[in-house]
Amino acid sequence: MELDDAEVKKIAHLARLGIDPADIPEYVRNLTDILSFVEQLNKVDTAGVPPLAHPLDASQRLRADVVTETDQRAEFQSGAPLVEDGLYLVPKVIE
Amino acid sequence: MQHKTLAELSAGLDSGDYTSEELTTACLERIERLNGPLNCFITVTAEEALAAARAADARRQSGKAGPLTGIPYAHKDIFCTRGVRTSCASRMLDNFISPYDATVTQRLAAAGAVMLGKTNMDEFAMGSSNETSYYGPVRNPWNQDTVPGGSSGGSAAAVAARLVPASTGTDTGGSIRQPASLCGVTGLKPTYGRVSRYGMIAFASSLDQGGPITRTAEDAALLLEAMAGFDERDSTSVDQPVEDYRAGLGNSLKGMKIGLPAEYFDGAVDSGVGDAVEQALEEFRRLGAETVDIRLPHTYLSVPTYYVVAPAECSSNLSRFDGVRFGHRCQDPQDLEDMYKRSRGEGFGAEVKRRIMIGTYALSAGYYDAYYLKAQQARHLIRDDFRQAFEAVDVIMGPTTPTPAFRLGEKVDDPVTMYLSDVYTIAVNLAGLPGLSVPAGFVDGLPVGLHVIGNYFDEARLLNVAHQYQQVSDWHTRVPEGFE
Amino acid sequence: MEWEPVIGLEIHAQLATSSKIFSGASTAFGAQPNTQACAVDLGLPGVLPVLNREVIRMAASFGLATGSTVSKRSVFARKNYFYPDLPKGYQISQYELPVVQDGELTIELEDGTSKRIGITRAHLEEDAGKSLHEDFHGMTGIDLNRAGTPLLEIVSEPDMRSAKEAVAYMKMIHSLVRYLEISDGNMQEGSFRCDANVSVRPVGRESFGTRAEIKNINSFRFVEQAINYEIERQILLLESGGAVIQETRLFDPDRHETRSMRSKEEANDYRYFPDPDLLPVVLDQEFIDGVAAALPELPAARRQRFVDQYGLSDYDAGVLTASREFAEFFEATAREAGGNGKLAANWVMGEFTAALNKGGIDIADSPVSSGDLGRMLLRIDDGTISGKIAKQVFEAMWNGEGDADRIIEEKGLKQITDPAAIEAVIREVLENSPKQLEQYRGGQEKVFGYFVGQVMKATKGKANPGEVNALLKKMLGS
């Protein structure tokens, strides 16, 4: 798998990662290497093999519908980047 | 004092040879004196530790002490600790004071263990050399030009250098066992679901598992007992009682079947490492165990599978670091997109960014089936290899890593080569099995680890095997030069 | 060219649990910002989700009530995208294996016909927080109290062919979730909202046209307006040689139009994958049977019962069971009125509904309770007041003048049934109307009504009309 600059930029945008344009060639090289390496997976025929998302064949436990949490806003917001009137502030969201 | 094992220290506290405060003070002094060049710690919590030690002494006085009460330990900086910076060795969380405790943190506190500080690691646990930390690399106490392994490098090096008797680690693809091996200490990755992941900052959720790093198997048993157990806050935690891991340490290994996968003894193994492992196996035969040749035919798929599954999960797990509610936010963002991109671009290091991008790519439209789905299928094949193998053998052994510690900077520019240093440990995470690395010799003054893989929830047997080996070997008692 | 609209709805119903879908934080509406956003809701580093049992029960009951398949195995997946009110950078939803699949509902149309609407699936997901665009020095404020509130997203087949059908379907779902008590259906608070997928095609064509998705519509009226606007827009566009583009649009209720939300459109690639923090939800038959056994009486069954038990017409029973509140108000009224269902139905559907509509009030806020109304109906039943006087009594009750008995007493509205008293009034009326009496005797029988009117007027409507008729006939005949 050969990636190009445009693809790396597109992936970085999807992941909202700012990357220095000067670093793009290195990302192209590294990511291409990794993807080529990963392509060893194609050596095995997996037709009919069910995908395994979890190592143990367990099922989801269900929690009782009970309110157990109390207001901890002050502590949670004490380290927040920008807060006003209990709200987290971000640059204007344009709908 | 610092050369005693956790079990010995526990006995010493019990018999009143010293107090936890004295022990804690001694450890803090040693950290102060020796940690500098090793860089094992991101944060040392001296004051909190001394307060906890005094509380532990009071508890011991009142007769309510357990084996860990008053025992100092170092906590990997991936576990959330309320009121203490929890950085994950990332600039992203350099300013993050966790408002809550991880379940493991809580359990250790409840046992009376005394946290000395938070250890250095690869950023967000992504690395095998501890070179990706925002706080600089950790150095291997056995040779400071070499890496301690990763990602729990600070935890392993701190135990190896006798800065602490025990530490915690997490293991997603080998991050406990590989640094334990490279630093000459004992490290155990439990069965997936045995130790709660709540409050353990996620790298790859279906692979991550916390565990102990200690000098001896007996110490690992003590620490694991406190760390493990069902947690209703973790849906993947298994509701099964925790065993008394010490009870079976003395069991004989007579008749035990040890599987030796051909795939773990191929040309990729350094000859010195291979020899050390062979000698260890000879020791097990002398102890009455039987070795059996087995096959794990899909081993070659494990590293590629891992490098799809782990980045895919991490790309999503790390999306919450967006500069909105906690962590790093860039200066003067022009707009929302600029805030996301610069905060994340500045907050994450190169390896983390690489993995996020690989994972994003593997999950994206048009590539999901070829990468992610394919990897999940391969994962099934890998797990079934082990299931089959464990029908015939009790444990599986091999080298923990193909080579001893490599030099700092040696693989940093070549991700794929770096990834291959986890070739023997990764499959165990994909299958969710428990695995342990036990010191088994030296090559050119650098430690070699023997990897012992067990069946699901067979931690007691792994600890028994390692303990028996440690009764007839002394690798785990060796001290690196300058740290005697 | 004749065009046919094709409409499918995605309805989001907020489930009425006490705690959130994956955390123990409260779901109560209206708290101070971020005071009900716990560590899990905030997506703090290291936190993990644990599924609320109640949401599974609620989803299963919806599935059973719509003849759907309740999946024995369903999976939660992550939908990845960045938005400030989405704390983890992904929404936990269901993708490939939803909890409910393949059901249907029958809607009734205004012309009396009915139509089957397919339900493709209903899946569980967590709600996002809210972005507040008020003035924070040009910034947006984020309140995450709503983040993690459980939603059931109900996806229909593209089976609707007009805005009216879409509204009928949405009302039906609204009624159903309230019958099931799985959602309060409060549209003002956003507990019940929908996205509409709209396309048009030439009549007779099999394949669908390109659709636009109108997001987040939160009233029945807006749904109708938005769909109708969108149909018009697409037809105009196609007829002028243009093409509809697949996009997300927003309905502007002030301008009655939809507009493109291009900003949200750019390269959405949600990268769904199974959430590794959650395990597959496995339901056994016993659980599903338990939910089935506990289902309340559903609208169709209740409608039939109203016909059987109260002797109502099918139409009336249909109107009364359209919403759970309405049906319950009716039954409580009928019970209070000694089981006289027909009388109760007439009043609930008549005066009572008219008063609600006139005041624009919700049934829950009605100043007249079912007990008040029922007790008044008892007075009609026992002859204390006539139906006509009852309207006065009802109006007084509506205006808060007290209960029926008190109003009848205070206003002296009690019906006059004493024949001697009525006879006296009739005699007086006849004496005062010699001209009319002559006409009547001359064969103009219409004048009879005039006499009745005069008697009622003289008694201020309180004379028993039956008695008046009988006596008048007798006296005129003699």
Image: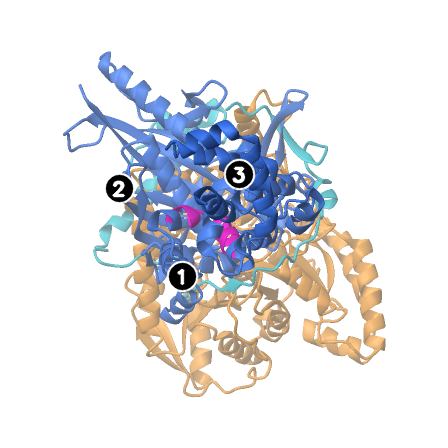
Chain colours: A cyan, B orange, C blue
Q: CA distance from mark 1 to mark 2?
A: 25 Å
**Disc with the residue nearer the chain's start (3 vs 1):** 3
Nearer the camera: disc 3 or disc 1: 1
User: Residue B38 location in percent, x, y?
Assistant: 66, 50
Q: Is residue C52 visible?
A: no
x%, y% of residue A73?
71, 44
* Kind of residue indicated by mark 3: Gly
Q: Chain of mark 3?
A: C
Q: Nearer the viewer, mark 1 or mark 2?
A: 1
Q: Which is nearer the N-term, disc 1 or disc 2?
A: 2
Q: Is residue C333 magenta?
A: no
**Residue highlighted by disc 1:** C309
The residue beneath circle 3 is: C190
Work out whether residue B363 can be spotted.
yes
- Structural crowding at the residue carrying mark 1, measured as other residues with C-alpha within 10 Å and reported as few (<14), some (14–19) or many (≥20): few
Tell me the kind of residue under disc 2.
Thr
Whether discs 1 and 2 lie on one chain: the answer is yes
Residue A35 at x, y percent in the picture: 34, 41
Q: Residues within 10 Å of mark 3 (few under 14, many from 20)?
A: some
| Inter-mark Cα distance, 3 to 1 | 37 Å
Chain ID, mark 2: C
Q: Nearer the viewer, residue C60 or B321?
A: C60
Question: What residue span does the magenta drawing correspond to?
Answer: C318-331
Per the image, label 3 sits on a secondary structure element best described as loop
Q: Amino acid at mark 1?
A: Gln
Name the residue tied to disc 2. C113
Alpha carbon separation for disc pair 3 and 2: 31 Å
Q: Foreground: B271 or C386? A: C386
Q: Which of the image's four quarters has the N terminus of chain B?
A: bottom right
Tell me residue C428's x, y (percent): 59, 37
